[in-house]
Amino acid sequence: MRYFIPFTIAAAMLASAGAASAQVGDPHAGHGGMAMAAPSSASVLTSPADGSMSSSAPTAFSITFPHAMTLKSLTLTTDGGRPTAVPVQAAAGTKTTVALPALGKGNHVLAWSAEGADGHAMSGVARFMVH
């Protein structure tokens, strides 16, 4: 009996230590409803879409915002080339389409920035490939 009591106490201590380490294992346990907000550009749709691949080059860039915005700048960078400004017309709206210069095969990046009537800014990138 003299060995049974210390063994029981030791077993209880190990069990509680295991439970404590299980709680420490996931520091975010119990925070399921506390997700971080998505970036504002997450609700913006572009064509071509970020990460898209196509066998033909797009002739225009379209962007759809969740609310009225003015597209302020659009910059095109092709495989290892210098960034080139693409002319945009400043007009507020939820959708804007801009003509693109002729694009060849390869990787292309369109970086955009826009501004709302209240002065808030949004920006993003659409990376795409033409086969």
Image (cartoon, grey):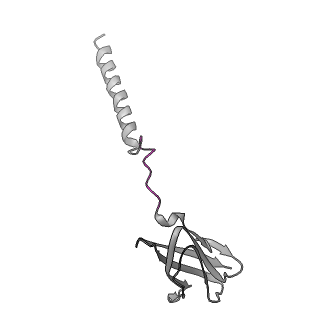
| Residue 37 counted in the magenta span | yes
108 and 37: which is toward the camera: 37
Task: Give the residues in magenta.
Answer: 29-38
| Residue 54 counted in the magenta span | no
Per the picture, the main secondary structure of the magenta-coloured stretch is: loop
Marks counted in the figure total 0
Where's residue 122, x and y in %?
A: 46, 71
Residue 129: name its quadrant.
bottom right
Q: Residue at x 62, y 82 (%)?
A: 106
Q: Residue at x 32, y 26 (%)?
A: 13
Where's residue 53, x and y in %?
A: 66, 74
Q: Residue at x 48, y 76 (%)?
A: 114
Which residue is most to the right? 55
Residue 131: name its quadrant.
bottom right
Q: In this picture, is 103 found above or below 117? A: below
35 and 78: which is toward the camera: 35
Task: Judge from the rendering whether residue 58 lies leftward or rightward of residue 38; answer left or right.
Answer: right
Which residue is most to the top? 1
Task: Judge from the rendering whether residue 100 lies leftward or rightward of residue 55; answer left or right.
Answer: left
97 and 14: which is toward the camera: 97
Which quadrant of the rendered structure holds the N terminus? Answer: top left
Task: Judge from the rendering whether residue 33 lies leftward or rightward of residue 44; answer left or right.
Answer: left
Q: In this picture, is 15 found above or below 126? A: above
24 and 59: which is toward the camera: 59
Where's residue 128, x and y in %?
A: 60, 76
Q: Residue at x 40, y 45 (%)?
A: 28
Where's residue 94, x and y in %?
A: 56, 71
Q: In this picture, is 40 found above or below 123? A: above
Task: Judge from the rendering whether residue 116 lies leftward or rightward of residue 93; answer left or right.
Answer: left
